[in-house]
Amino acid sequence: MSEVQNQNPESCTHDCSTCGTDCPSRNPESFIEAPHPFSQIKKVIGVVSGKGGVGKTMVASLLASFMNKRGYHVGIMDADITGPSIPKAFGLNTKAMGNEDGIFPVKSKDGVDIMSINLLLPDETDPVVWRGPVIAGMIKNFWNQVIWENEDYLFIDMPPGTGDVPLTVFQSIPLNGIIIVTSPQELVSLIVTKAVKMAEMMNIPILGVVENMSYFECPDCGKRHKIFGDSHIEEIAFGHGLAVIGRLPIDPSLAAHADSGKIEEIEGDWLDPALAIIESMTKATH
């Protein structure tokens, strides 16, 4: 590789051992983007998953809603550009507005600030058929062109996997920590390990693991049934030095609330350990 190529992030192999160029890749923090000058954001938390379909958006939405109920000012950045679903879960039908200063998030019924590509498209059903660099650029715009006012916590609903777009978030936005969402299926170990290794490579703190679809509780007798078999999430998390900080049940009412835009009406204690850890992040700085 030539020196010019190594200085270009698009062609960099990220293997500094084979390169003698003093480029920004040697210091990931050099890629960090500044937020909008009018933004005030105390803590940024990414909600990630190693694969799609495990309920990452549900967890991100509930964390934001529950923290809002505890009296914190909360925002959600929907970084899943090609599969945005946060606005639907919160029942948002209005479009994001802006002025010469920047773009303003749309507020949910209970006051959660939300920014998503669906709040900018003429029709929310329009597909986003963009290549990776364009998607990455839009995520950066959500960070540096949107005015996030007085946010105690900004949750980022990350796209699934470990590709270009999650990498953009990890490199461009100063995350204070991430929460890994998984499920009890057999491939959980591989999925969690991929997400953990990516976070470790980028020096991002991992707050813990949340297991979705953990069990089904019979409405008649209250007994819990493990639909996907015995979960090994405790030992998997322990193997990575992590804690399980929440378990969501298989509950049709959860999906029904999200589908009808009423996720803020959901009540439950499934994520209380996660909420306690998130809350402690702010208390520790006081």
Image: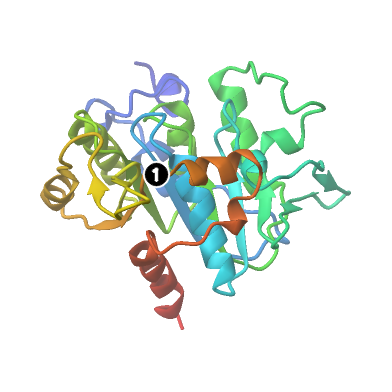
- The residue tagged with tag 1: helix, strand or loop? helix
Residue 56 horizontal/vertical position (percent): 44, 41
Q: Quadrant of residue 215?
A: top left
Q: Quadrant of the N terminus?
A: top left
Q: Quadrant of residue 139?
A: top right
Identity of the residue drawn at 19% across and 29% down: 186
Left or right: where 237 falls relative to 50:
left
* Color encoding of the figure: rainbow
- Residue extending farthest to the front is 220
Residue for point 38% across, 66% down? 272
Q: Is residue 268 above or below residue 19?
A: below
Residue 206 in the image, given as x and y percentages of width and height: 31, 53
* x and y, in percent, of residue 51 in the image: 36, 29
Query: Along the line of sight, which residue is nearer the eye, 227 or 110?
Result: 227
Q: Position of residue 265 (x, y in %)?
A: 60, 58
Whether residue 96 appears in this view of the structure is yes
Please tell me which residue lies in front, 242 or 213: 213
Residue at numbered disc 1: 28
**Amino acid type for the residue under numbered disc 1:** Pro
> Quick one: label 1, few (<14), some, or many (20+) residues within 10 Å?
some
In the depicted view, which residue is nearer to us: 34 or 253?
253
